[in-house]
Image (cartoon, rainbow, N blue to C red):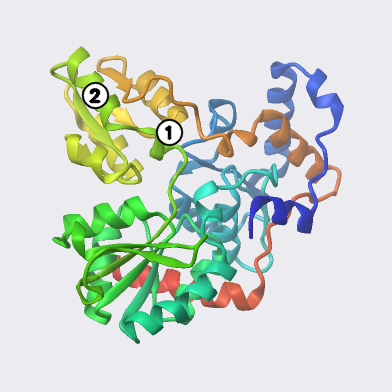
């Protein structure tokens, strides 16, 4: 389901005008008051890519799956106000109890990557791929996908993956079937398979817009079918960006997220998940130099946290993730004040059958990773 469809289904109440007239100090004071009032009944997970004005009030920060797991363990919380994007809140709803309510402060906060693989496209592609390859394909989906895509993988023997455990999960998938279908991020799939020794010429791309397989060669050689999707942020890091860093800062380490394209990963010094990037910088010696290729809110936060190191963005003109940025202080306060007044807005609730199948995919990963 796209963000537009989701907003139409659930409704997006316009932010009351009064929040535009409140000062930051007033809003922050009210957020603190409401958090104190609800106590353990209220839990605010905040994704690494969120704005500082939101992260400062988060009870836990991390990657999407990590936050959903933390929310699930926090059984005292009645309300989980997820400061992230839609698919993350869906995962939290799948993993938490029926008594817990998951809320997204702004229903327009989506993920363009997740929207690049909808269930109708996937259900249409699956029989076509079986016509080409028979029953030799196992579907894997990045956790940055809709609940419906996770459920599709669960029903068909597949699993979810994170950027941290993608290598482990792809290696497992090859013990189950001869080929894998990797949704929805072609770059993470390509980089992971390449690191495991799969040649690029043994990878094909499925274009959901044309329902066509993009490949030149013998179909029997194909081991990985990559869904034609990408992260709109990481796609914008280029080889030229890295070359410019090398010219300007010859001693600088370049570290990027594996959602960047293969060419960028190939010319970088390190590539890994958000946690990997954070840990690498934390463990690096004082005075070391780093260029980071990931979302700008996080890069700026890392820079502020490590004044003893010289850190820049691989692309200094990169914008923060626009959909993540929809969660801001006014929307957070509006959500909390609505709760205080007994009105629960922007509830994220995954269909029970979809949740059941999606949980199969998640649990297969959690049992292995």
Q: Quadrant of the N terminus?
A: bottom right
Please indicate, yes or no, whether residue 356 appears anywhere in the rendered image. Answer: yes
- Tell me how far mark 2 sits from mark 1, CA to CA: 15 Å
| 72 over 354 or under it: above or below | above
Task: Answer left or right for 351 relative to 240.
Answer: right
Q: Residue at horizontal 31%, vertical 25%?
A: 314
Residue 175 lies in what quarter of the image? bottom left
Between residue 361 and residue 244, name the one nearer to us: 244
The tally of labels here is 2
List x then y, in percent, for residue 274: 35, 41
Residue 135 lies in what quarter of the image? bottom left
Q: Secondary structure at mark 1?
A: loop
Task: Answer left or right for 242 relative to 102.
Answer: left
Give the label on residue 290, or none.
Answer: 2
Task: Give the mark nearer the N terminus: 2 vs 1.
Answer: 2
Q: Residue at horizontal 53%, vertical 75%?
A: 123
């Amino acid at each position: 389901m796209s963000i537009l469809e989701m907003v139409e289904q659930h409704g997006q109440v316009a932010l009351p005008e009064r929040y535009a007239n409140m000062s930051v100090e007033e809003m922050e004071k009210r957020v603190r008051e409401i958090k104190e009032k609800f106590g353990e009944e209220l839990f605010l997970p905040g994704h690494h890519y969120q704005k500082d004005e939101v992260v400062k009030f988060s009870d836990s920060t991390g990657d999407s799956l990590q936050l959903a797991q933390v929310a699930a363990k926090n059984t005292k919380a009645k309300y989980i106000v997820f400061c992230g994007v839609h698919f993350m809140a869906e995962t939290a709803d799948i993993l938490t109890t029926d008594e817990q309510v998951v809320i997204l402060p702004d229903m327009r906060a989506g993920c363009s990557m997740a929207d690049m693989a909808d269930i109708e496209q996937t259900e249409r592609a699956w029989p076509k791929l079986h016509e080409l390859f028979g029953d030799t394909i196992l579907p894997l989906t990045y956790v940055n996908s809709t609940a419906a895509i996770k459920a599709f993988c669960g029903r068909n023997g597949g699993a979810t993956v994170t950027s941290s455990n993608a290598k482990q999960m792809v290696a497992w998938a090859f013990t189950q079937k001869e080929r894998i279908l990797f949704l929805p991020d072609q770059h993470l799939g390509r980089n992971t398979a390449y690191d495991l020794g799969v040649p690029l010429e043994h990878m094909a791309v499925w274009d959901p817009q044309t329902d066509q397989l993009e490949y030149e060669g013998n179909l029997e050689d194909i081991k990985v079918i990559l869904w034609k999707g990408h992260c709109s942020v990481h796609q914008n890091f280029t080889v030229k960006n890295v070359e410019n860093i090398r010219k300007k800062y010859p001693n600088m380490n370049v570290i990027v997220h594996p959602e960047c394209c293969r060419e960028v990963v190939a010319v970088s010094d390190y590539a890994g998940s958000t946690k990997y990037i954070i840990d690498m910088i934390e463990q690096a010696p004082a005075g070391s130099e780093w260029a980071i290729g990931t979302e700008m809110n996080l890069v700026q936060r890392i820079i502020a946290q490590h004044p003893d190191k010289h850190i820049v963005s691989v692309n200094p003109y990169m914008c923060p993730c626009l959909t993540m940025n929809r969660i801001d202080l006014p929307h957070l306060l509006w959500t909390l004040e609505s709760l205080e007044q007994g009105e629960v807005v922007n509830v994220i609730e995954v269909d029970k059958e979809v949740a059941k199948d999606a949980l199969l995919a998640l649990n297969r990963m959690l049992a292995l990773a």
